[in-house]
Image: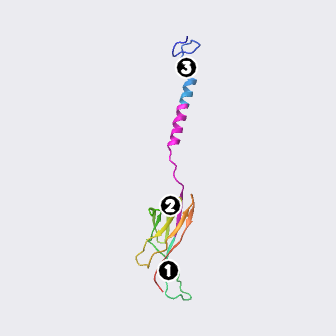
């Protein structure tokens, strides 16, 4: 009969005290911890980008040859990205060039421009379906009221 804690060879060396067993045990513990860390990691949904330019027009009551009547950029327009329940997921404000950029999780949304002081009405809402990693360009136009 082999005493507890000894090997069958009777050398009196516990299996737990052999270097090869300790290395194997240490690797097993490290692997278990690494796997547990991987399992605990939450997956972040893939994001997508909506960007574009906000303009206002017309800028001239009558279009005349040689006169630039291009739509002008709108600074300070607030653009909201709403989910299907109407919850705001992201908000952006257009810069001096009228540029805006929103980032959010992939999904179906409504791009909702907010009223801008000094402009008639609001740019039209746009439904957008954002695929993971997509980069959608949606330009928005406000009405100046000039006729």
Q: Is residue 117 magenta?
A: no
Answer with mark 2 or mark 3, whichever residue precedes in sequence. Answer: 3
Residue reaching furthest left? 117
Q: Please tell me which residue is depicted at 40% across the width and 76% down the height of the picture.
A: 117
> In this orientation, does residue 94 appear?
no
Q: Residue at x 53, y 29 (%)?
A: 26
Between the residue at mark 2 and the residue at mark 3, the CA separation in whole angstroms equals 57 Å
Q: Which mark is residue 103?
A: 2
Q: Secondary structure at mark 2?
A: strand
Q: Position of residue 105 (x, y in %)?
A: 51, 58
The answer to whether 78 is drawn above or below residue 70 in the figure is above
Count of residue discs = 3
* Location of mark 3 (residue): 15
* Magenta segment: 28-52
Q: Earlier in the sequence, mark 1 or mark 2?
A: 1
1 and 2 marks in contact (CB < 8 Å): no
Residue 6, numbered label? none
Check residue 57 in the rendering and tell me which mark sits there, or answer none: 1
Disc 2 crowd rating (10 Å Cα; few below 14, some 14-19, many 20+) is some
Between 26 and 113, the one nearer to me in the picture: 113
Mark sitting earlier along the chain (1/3): 3
Q: Is residue 32 magenta?
A: yes
Q: Residues within 10 Å of mark 1 (few under 14, many from 20)?
A: some
């Amino acid at each position: 009969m082999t005493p507890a804690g000894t090997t069958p060879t009777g050398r009196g060396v516990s299996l737990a005290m052999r270097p090869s067993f300790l290395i194997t045990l240490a690797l097993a513990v490290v692997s278990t911890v690494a796997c547990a860390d991987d399992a605990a990691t939450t997956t972040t949904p893939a994001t997508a980008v909506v960007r574009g330019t906000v303009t206002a027009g017309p800028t001239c009551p009558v279009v005349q040859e040689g006169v630039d009547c291009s739509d002008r950029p709108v600074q300070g327009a607030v653009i909201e990205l709403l989910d299907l329940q109407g919850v705001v997921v992201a908000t952006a404000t257009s810069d001096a060039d009228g540029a805006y950029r929103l980032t959010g999780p992939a999904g179906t949304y409504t791009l909702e421009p907010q009223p801008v002081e000094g402009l008639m009405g609001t740019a039209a809402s746009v439904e957008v379906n954002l695929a993971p990693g997509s980069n959608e360009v949606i330009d928005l136009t406000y009405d100046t009221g000039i006729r």
